[in-house]
Image: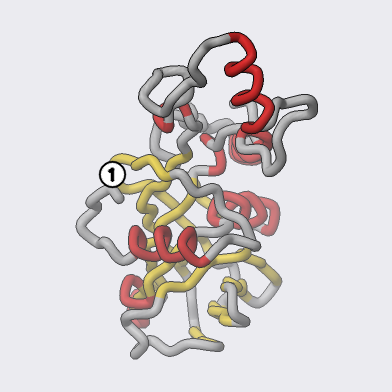
């Protein structure tokens, strides 16, 4: 595990004497305390959660949800998709002039030197999360009746009286209860995506991820 999220998962959950799955295996975690929930929060950051996939089983004191999470522990390096050309990189105009001077035709899109297949891919996966020992549930900024809504998860913050799950757009989920225990497990196979989560994403990127989140049959976008 070479990236920060993978090291964090390994460090916190490995100290309990248990085993942490390799990067290419489904993630399976259990959280008991604030330190554990900090790791869960990192793993679930920017996950997409359809409201229809949330449910509170009051008799069991369990709140369950299914998220479409970005696999941060498997992400490509931060600098893999630079926003600006590398220093000294020739411009298209320079490339064309250079080719003309040499008597050679410029490279075309049909040549194999530059391919979309070479672009780094990220991964997303469906993930089941349950919270046990939940006494009360409160919603802010959305209701359970909004079954078509998809929320973007920002953080999971635990305190002495429960925990708060915050979402983009000032939405939040409050789970009240002492000693809440969380179980997190990836479901099915991950699928590739070109989009790396960003809080300044373009509308097409957001729509692409939301389309994937609402696909409950596990078809890969």
| Quarter occupied by residue 141 | bottom right
Apparent side of residue 57 relative to residue 195 in the rendered image (left or right): left
Name the residue furthest right: 87
Q: Where residue 209 sits: x, y (%)?
A: 42, 59
Nearest the eye: 50 or 117 = 117
**x 54%, y 55%: residue:** 44
Name the residue furthest left: 217
Q: The residue tagged with tag 1: helix, strand or loop?
A: strand
Q: Where residue 61 sits: x, y (%)?
A: 41, 76
Q: Where residue 34 sits: x, y (%)?
A: 68, 58
Nearest the eye: 178 or 40 = 40
Looking at the rendering, in which quadrant would you find the N terminus?
top right
Nearest the eye: 203 or 33 = 203
Nearest the eye: 193 or 92 = 92
**x 70%, y 70%: residue:** 159
Q: Give the vertical position of 44 relative to 146 (above or below).
A: above
Tell me if I can see residue 11 in this picture: no
Q: Where residue 149 sits: x, y (%)?
A: 39, 79
**x 40%, y 18%: residue:** 112
Q: Mark 1 points at which residue?
A: 188
**x 20%, y 57%: residue:** 217
């Amino acid at each position: 595990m070479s990236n920060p999220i993978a090291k964090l998962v390994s460090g916190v959950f490995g100290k309990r004497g248990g085993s942490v799955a390799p990067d290419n295996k489904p993630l399976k975690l259990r959280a008991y305390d604030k330190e554990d929930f900090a790791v869960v929060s990192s793993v679930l950051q920017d996950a997409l959660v359809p409201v229809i996939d949330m449910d509170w089983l009051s008799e069991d004191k369990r709140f369950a949800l299914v998220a479409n999470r970005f696999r941060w522990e498997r992400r490509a390096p931060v600098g893999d998709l630079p926003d600006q050309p590398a220093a000294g990189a020739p411009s298209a105009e320079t490339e064309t002039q250079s080719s003309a001077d040499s008597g050679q035709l410029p490279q075309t899109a049909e040549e194999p030197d530059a391919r979309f297949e070479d672009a780094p891919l990220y991964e997303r996966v469906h993930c089941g999360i349950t919270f046990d020992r939940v006494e009360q549930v409160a919603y802010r900024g959305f209701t359970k009746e909004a079954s078509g809504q998809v929320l973007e998860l920002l953080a999971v913050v635990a305190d002495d009286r429960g925990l708060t799950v915050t979402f983009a757009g000032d939405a939040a989920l409050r789970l009240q209860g002492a000693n809440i225990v969380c179980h997190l497990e990836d479901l099915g196979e991950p699928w590739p995506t070109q989009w790396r989560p960003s809080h300044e994403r373009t509308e097409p990127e957001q729509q692409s991820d939301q389309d994937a989140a609402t696909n409950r049959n596990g078809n890969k976008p």
